[in-house]
Amino acid sequence: MHQSSAAHLAACWVTGDERSRESPAPAEAQMQAGAEGGGRVSRCCWKCSVTQLKKIFWGVAVVLGVCSSWSGSTQLAKLTFKKFDAPFTLTWFATNWNFLFFPLYYLGHVFKSAEKQSPKQRYRECCRFFGDNGLTLKVFFTKAAPFGVLWTLTNYLYLHAIKKINTTDVSVLFCCNKAFVFLLSWIVLRDRFMGVRIVAAIFAIAGIVMMTYADGFHSHSVIGIALVVGSASMSALYKVLFKLLLGSAKFGEAALFLSVLAVFNVLFVTCIPVILYFTKVEYWSSFAVVPWGNLCGFSILLLTFNILLNFGIAITYPTLISLGIVLSVPVNAVVDHYTSEIVFNSVRVIAIVIIGLGFLLLLLPEEWDVWVIKLLTRLKVRKKEEIPEGNGDITSGLPNKSRRTRPSMSSFAH
């Protein structure tokens, strides 16, 4: 723009044909300026669209990863219990793999970060998440140990429920944890009240009751449903307490925290599988009969699921990640249909649909109603502008023609 102004000033000193030849006419100058501005806008829109396409592409990949890892771990756990009936030992074994979170994060930091730090420096920086003094013994017992207990209970109750009922019911009932998170956040954290989320919570509760009724209130199914609802409640309590006591965490801080949970598991939970083994509650004849392939496979799938769940927001939208969890329900349903004697009666199907709908309602952003009102207003404005065009009135001559060719301003109101 500065160059075109200087050319215009120099052209003022030229007379006659030279001025007309060297200085552009006002209309031409406006066209050039418009072309330059339009080029910049188009380039900006192109960059934005490419960025959004990349996020959507990675989002699809993460959704497939979350869905496959979650449903895969659920099915593999069901298969493992046919040979190795020890849900708490499996929980303990899989939780130990959480120790890999921080090393894996540090490898990513080395490859991606411009300013590389030593492992000790990165550890100390991430320890600030726990307070000014870092990860002290007091902080370990007050801020890490409670979450270690909740983590163990969540996974143990979920795995124990898989022994009692089919994986479809377990996976769909666990989706209720999002409704429990909303209710606890509304009560404890004083989060904003949203009517649509209350409706979603009602759907979740209604789905739980209908799921219980689907099998005729048998003791076996009622215990299994109670276990998975307890698991969803522990998961919700974990998330709400984390936000209340620790706030939000960066990627490195979250990785360190999950690795600390593995340390807590090794130091203080190891005694429980040992006690269960010697009391023959969870007993196996020899270590040779333990299906180590299934145990390691389940642990790797669960680790992958938690990595995608915690760090997937770096490359895509959080809503897409959550969709992967609910999409695991139809995957488990298809597998159960061919591998078990599950009966998809009308009550069970309605319960699955209601809980899934409640889960999707909870994914709506807080400003969803404002967005809907804006969209409806924009559609009304566009419809009003299209009415004169549809009448074909040509009596007004040129003014009507200019009105027809003028672009709708609503299309630029972003």
Image: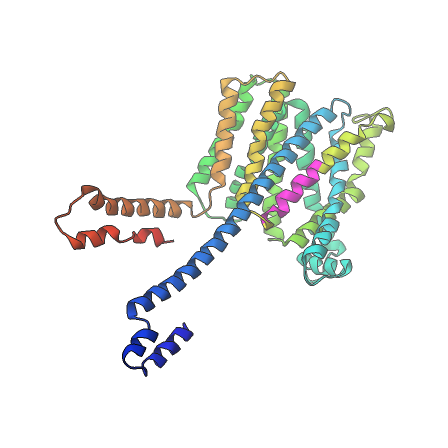
Q: Quadrant of residue 369?
A: top left
Q: Quadrant of residue 68?
A: top right
Image position of 58 (left or right of 87): left
Q: Residue furthest front?
A: 17
Q: What count of labels does the image hold? A: 0
Q: Residue furthest left?
A: 395
Q: Which x, y percent locates residue 294?
A: 76, 30
Q: Residue at x 54, y 47 (%)?
A: 55
Q: Residue at x 65, y 19 (%)?
A: 339
Q: Is residue 70 above or below residue 244?
A: above
Report the front residue among 122 and 2.
2
Report the front residue among 361 and 180.
361
Q: Residue at x 70, y 28 (%)?
A: 76
Image position of 156 (left or right of 52): right
Report the front residue among 61 and 97.
61
Q: Which x, y percent locates residue 177?
A: 57, 37
Magenta span of residues: 301-313
- The way the protein has been coloured in the rendering is rainbow
Residue 275 visible from this viewpoint: yes
Residue 312 belongs to magenta span? yes
Q: Which x, y percent locates residue 195?
A: 42, 41
Q: Is residue 282 above or below residue 414?
A: above
Q: Quadrant of residue 132?
A: bottom right
Mostly what secondary structure, the magenta segment? helix
Q: Is residue 7 above or below residue 45?
A: below
Quick one: quadrant of the N terminus? bottom left
Q: Residue at x 65, y 39 (%)?
A: 305
Residue 289 belongs to magenta span? no
Image position of 94 (left or right of 182): right
